[in-house]
Amino acid sequence: MKTRTYILPPLLAMLLLFVTAQVASAGDGDYPGYIALEPALVVNLDNPRRAQFLQIQAQFYVETAADAERVQQHMPVIRDRMITYFGGRDPDKVRGAQERERMRAEVLDHLREAMEETSGAPSISNLYFTGFIVQ
């Protein structure tokens, strides 16, 4: 009977430490992390001969859960800025890898400015294209 008395307090202490560590790590979320632009963005390109579209799948990289929340809250502003930026471009000027990288850097700057204006923090650390289709 005395053996149980000595084993129970350390066992309970270890269990409490384990549960506390799990709760603390769950509160941090998965940040830094990625937020998908969903659904994919589709814009019209400037082709006078036929209808042509650009479909973009992207991921936003954020550093904190607060940044993620701001990005989700202001997703309409983000989508609007991206549509305004990419829409109406010459299809031949969106195809090359160098041009795509230049546009990625520019639109990231525009998005960070928009987030600063609307939420008070740039929130988006980086932008990655995971799909970029001209059709």
Image: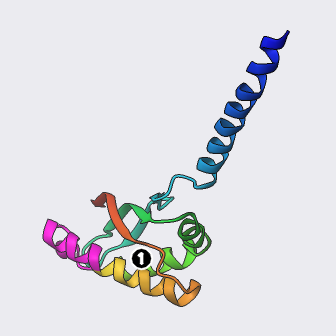
Q: Residues within 10 Å of mark 1 (few under 14, many from 20)?
A: some
Q: What is the quadrant of residue 49 in the picture?
A: bottom left
Q: What is the quadrant of residue 119 in the picture?
A: bottom right
Q: Is 46 colored magenta in this rendering?
A: no
Q: What element carries label 1?
A: helix
Q: In this view, does 107 lie to the left or right of 123?
A: left
Tell me the quarter of the image containing the N terminus: top right
Q: What is the quadrant of residue 32 in the picture?
A: bottom left
Query: Does 73 sit above or below residue 118?
Result: above
Q: Is 101 colored magenta in this rendering?
A: yes
The chosen color scheme is rainbow
From the top left corner, tell me how far across and down residue 3 is, in percent: 78, 12
Observer-nearest residue: 48 or 1? Answer: 1
Q: Which residue type carries mark 1? A: Met
Q: Which residue was labeled with disc 1?
A: 82
Q: Please, what is the dominant secondary structure of the magenta stretch?
A: helix
Q: Which residue is drawn at 42% across and 80% down?
A: 111
Considering every residue shown, the one lying at the far front of the view is 2
From the top left corner, tell me how far across and down residue 5 is, in percent: 82, 19
Query: Does 120 sit above or below residue 44?
Result: below
Q: Is residue 73 left or right of residue 38?
A: right
Q: What stretch is highlighted in magenta?
A: 87-105
Q: Is residue 87 left or right of residue 35?
A: left
